[in-house]
């Protein structure tokens, strides 16, 4: 189960001790990645090498950085050993209906990522149903590998309804990552059962330990 979890520590006050603990847990529990602040990417790579799959965030958490700044963030993260990028769309552009601009930004970052995975955070809590559907189409056309629900810093996180909506409207090449508010084993199991390829949570190890206490050993 935890092989599909992005083990996450994105608090503004995260220390190296916090990050090292996260990485040690990721190695022990075989999580899909560690999702960490950009400032720790190089240090993690130096300390752990290929023992952990490093994911970082771009334009986080508000999304309204200019595209050039997001490109620079991606380039540096990849140069320092990052393998996966979770970018936040410009939510203001989405709300203004500037969908061409949103698509071009995602397409530009995907070109910079190359073979590395790009996940697109659309922050569902701020969007209407119609805007969510539009973002499914945009992420598909722009060539990103994943659409992701939330930063975990907004007013709401992943919901069953949004995952079901994504499945109805994303293209066949796009996967889903649920994030934000995944706080129980039941949450994690639900999102995986709904077909999410990844789930982002800071509680991954706690959930695994809960699983082990209940006598289930799958990771």
Image (cartoon, rainbow, N blue to C red):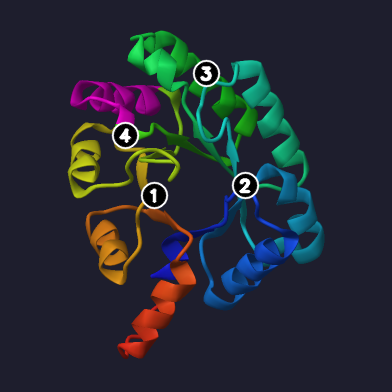
Callout 2: few (<14), some (14-19), or many (20+) C-alpha neighbours within 10 Å?
Answer: few
Residue 12: image tag: 2
Q: Local crowd at mark 1 within 10 Å, few (<14), some, or many (≥20)?
A: many
Q: Which of marks 1 and 2 is nearer the N terminus?
A: 2
- Spatial CA distance of label 1 from label 4 is 10 Å
Q: Nearer the viewer, mark 4 or mark 3?
A: 4
Q: Which of marks 2 and 4 is in front?
A: 2
Q: Name the residue under label 1.
A: 179
In terms of image quadrants, where is residue 199? bottom left
Residue 100, horizontal then vertical, whole percent: 41, 9
Q: Which residue is drawn at 65% across and 63% down?
A: 52
Pointer 3: residues within 10 angstroms few (<14), some, or many (20+)?
many
| Quarter where residue 50 is shown | bottom right
What x and y, as percent, mark residue 145?
A: 44, 38
Tell me the magenta residue range.
126-141
Q: Mark 3 — residue?
A: 105
- Return the residue at label 4: 124
């Amino acid at each position: 189960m935890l092989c599909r979890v992005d083990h996450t520590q994105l608090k503004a006050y995260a220390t190296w001790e916090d990050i090292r603990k996260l990485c040690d847990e990721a190695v022990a529990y075989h999580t899909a990645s560690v999702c960490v602040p950009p400032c720790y990417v190089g240090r993690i790579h130096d300390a752990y090498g290929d023992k952990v799959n490093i994911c970082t965030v771009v334009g986080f958490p508000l999304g309204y950085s200019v595209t050039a700044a997001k490109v620079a963030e991606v380039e540096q993260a990849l140069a320092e050993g990052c393998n996966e990028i979770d970018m936040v769309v410009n939510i203001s552009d989405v709300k203004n209906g500037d969908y061409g601009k949103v698509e071009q930004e995602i397409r530009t970052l995907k070109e910079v990522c190359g073979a590395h995975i790009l996940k697109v955070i659309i922050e569902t809590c701020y969007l209407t149903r119609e805007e969510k559907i539009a973002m499914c189409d945009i992420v598909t056309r722009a060539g990103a590998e994943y659409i992701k629900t939330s930063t975990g810093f907004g007013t709401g996180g992943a919901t069953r309804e949004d995952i079901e909506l994504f499945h109805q409207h994303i293209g066949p090449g796009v996967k889903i990552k649920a994030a934000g508010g995944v706080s129980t084993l039941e949450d994690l199991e639900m999102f995986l059962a709904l077909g999410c390829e990844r789930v982002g949570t800071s509680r991954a190890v706690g959930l695994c330990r809960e699983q082990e206490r209940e006598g289930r050993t799958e990771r």
